[in-house]
Amino acid sequence: MSLTDATREKLRGVSVATLATALYKRGLRNQVLQDVHPVAVKGRNMVGPAFTLRYIPAREDRNTLEEFRNPEHPQRQAIEQCPAGHVMVMDSRKDPRAASSGDILITRLMVRGGEGVVTDGGFRDAGTIAKLDIPAYHNRPSSPTNLTLHEAIEINGPIGCGDVAVFPGDVIVGDYESVIVIPAEMADEVADEAVEMTAYENFVVDRVKAGATIIGLYPPTDESNLARFETWRKENNR
């Protein structure tokens, strides 16, 4: 199931926290990537289908510096194959001791139209990546080349990233805090619900700032708050 433009735009305006609650309602408790953080806040949500790269532990006879000269190396091929509008998600075994990638490859991904990049490992040149116009998420900065510890082995297969299963085509959303994985078949309905949840939460914030108690308001166990919400929506074109 492909990500529609309408759903993509809805997901750009909601938080990962709200999406986590919407997925929890559907029985999915473990969709937020653990120990994965924005390299820099970009002021916009990253939203796109997942395109994946899987690393395994490196073995010395297979991962020498000569691999940098191999045009078919999966790390470089993944950068060249990732479709525009997709988020490249890397399974780096939750190991940030060696870099999943650096600024040159991420710049190439950006120029090709990549929506963003995520690893549960680290990036080298993180300061430069932070200045690029592409959302990037990692565990922490890391200077050593991936070849010292990791071998890129499979492009666009199922992976684990930050303790979450990621399948190609799953919808990836990253905000200023974290990254969440939405099963592709749920993306439309989750986006719709998250938009509604966000509108109500914005209403709640306005009420709380005006001095209202949260009891009966959040959650709306006092139905009079729902009537106030409908009035607020009309007044705020929400």
Image (tube, grey):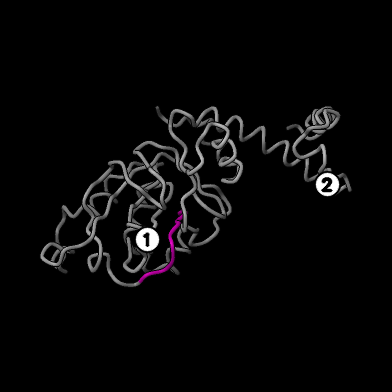
User: Viewer-proximal residue, 162 or 63?
Assistant: 162
The spot of residue 89 in percent (x, y) is: 37, 49
User: Viewer-proximal residue, 231 or 120?
Assistant: 120
- Where 185 falls versus 219 (above or below)? above
The spot of residue 96 in percent (x, y) is: 37, 65
Give the residue furthest to the bottom. Answer: 143
The residue positioned 44% from the left and 66% from the top of the image is 140
The residue positioned 63% from the left and 34% from the top of the image is 195
Range drawn in magenta: 134-142
Which disc number belongs to residue 121? 1
Q: Secondary structure at mark 1?
A: loop
Magenta includes 140?
Answer: yes
Magenta includes 226?
Answer: no
Side of 108 relative to 180 (left or right): left
Q: Amino acid at mark 1?
A: Gly
Side of 35 relative to 105 (left or right): right
- Where 139 falls versus 169 (above or below)? below
- Where 175 falls versus 235 (above or below)? below
| Residue of label 2 | 208
Give the residue furthest to the right. Answer: 211
Q: Secondary structure at mark 2?
A: helix
The quadrant where residue 149 appears: bottom left
The spot of residue 60 in percent (x, y) is: 14, 67
Dot 2 or dot 1: first in sequence order is 1
User: Viewer-proximal residue, 104 or 146?
Assistant: 146
